[in-house]
Image: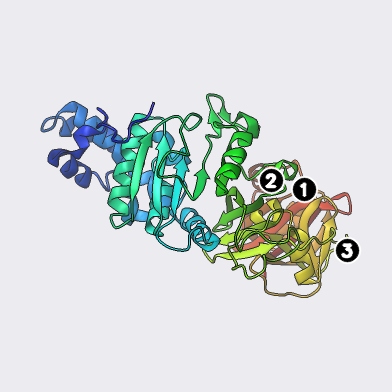
Amino acid sequence: MTDRTPSPAPSLAPLLSDEGQALLAALRDHDPAQELALATRLRRDHPAELVSAALAQARLRQRAVAKFGERDAYRMYFTPHGVEQATRTSVAAHRAGRFRDIGLRDSGPARITDLCCGVGGDAIELARAGFAVTAVDRDAVTCEIAALNVTTLAPDAPAATVVRADVLTYDLAAAPAPDALFIDPARRGGRGRIFDPEAYSPPLSWAVEAVRAVGAGGIKIAPGIPHELVPDDFEAEWISDGGDVKEAVLWHHATGPGAGPGPGSESGPGAGPGAITPGARRATLLPAGLTLTGRGLPDPPVREVGRYLYEPDGAVIRAHLVAEVADELDGGLIDETIAYITADERRPTPYAVAYEITDELPFNLKRLKALLRERGVGILTVKKRGSPVEPEELRRRMKLQGRESATVFLTRVAGAPTMLLGHPA
């Protein structure tokens, strides 16, 4: 089924009236904890249906601020699923920039088809970047919302169309044919997250073949995807924002400056920093926009704990680029299975957080408690890698008192359970 002009959905239509817009504006900063009393009061002057819809939308907008910022979130519309699954603005803008770096067309705005567009987070940034966007989703309410969001936030876009269709049967060859695809498969089901890429909707194999058929595109995937599932003719990029890993993307470009020589190189001949290199792995750190690309280095050596411990960014770890950071720091691993880097000197790097280590102790909670009490530590940051102990349980058992702060790493050193105590360098 295809519908290029979705009709207003009953649950959203009341909000688009003057009364609905005024009510939404009034609810912008409302306290969700006071909703029952607020709803009772509002229903004296407004239809109950409108009040319920406005309160629901106001809650969703407040949640969306973390992803879209206040300026955009309070002008957008959402569904509960849509706000949870939508791409945050910083990530979508980065991705739009990478599409721009590919060089899809010599003249005129390139057209990108956004399959499984949801509420339009990616379509908005693609449109803002100057692309002609066709956004596709099979849900009628979601299509209406996506159309409103793109029109509102990217009013000067070259062309933006929302199509209601099942992506599995949508005719990609129909005019206007896309220059590239972006596909964001659904990775949640009735029982929660879906970990098998072939259980995505649509399946990863289908998305890969669709991008290959068009010749260029990106596929959003879960960051935990096994590296062996990345096709050889695709680049894999892991993206973190503010230190938290948000997603991974598989990139493909059959021709052009991004079709580089393969793994281990920074980019193809004449390619820019955002060009696509088949077989490569990269980690991108936002908001700085820094990118680390794999050089095919062997695993770092395991060595004794030095003065400094470095915790690589999650995107670096997911992309298996710890060796590249260790080489930059002239460091090694504390254990062959643990992604902590140790070094004797402190060197600045944007790809890892440095800590100065003051104590290395065999795992013993009584000894740790005595040491923290002796030093007057009342604020304890607990980090763990390779330890079954939960941070909250540890803090509870420590019964912390004092004004000093410290960081403890519960981990393994050369295979032995170990506690490393220190502080941010």
CA gap, disc 1 and disc 3: 22 Å
- 135 or 270, which is in the foreground? 270
- Kindly identify the amino acid type of the residue bearing the numbered disc 1: Leu
Residue located at (75% from left, 58% from top): 263
- On screen, residue 117 versus residue 353, left or right, reads left
Towards the viewer: 225 or 135: 135
**Outermost residue toward the left?**
45
Q: Residue 53: give its label.
A: none
Q: Amino acid at mark 2?
A: Leu
Toward which corner of the image does residue 13 lie, by quadrant? top left
How far across and how far down the image is residue 157, in percent? 33, 56
Instruction: Estimate how packed mark 1 is, as few (under 14), some (14 to 19) or many (20 or more) residues with alpha carbons within 10 Å.
Output: few
In the rendered image, the quadrant that contains the N terminus is top left
Look at 28% across and 35% down and name the residue there.
Answer: 5
- What residue did someone put label 1 on? 365
Which residue lies under the disc numbered 3? Answer: 304
In the image, is residue 46 above or below residue 414? above
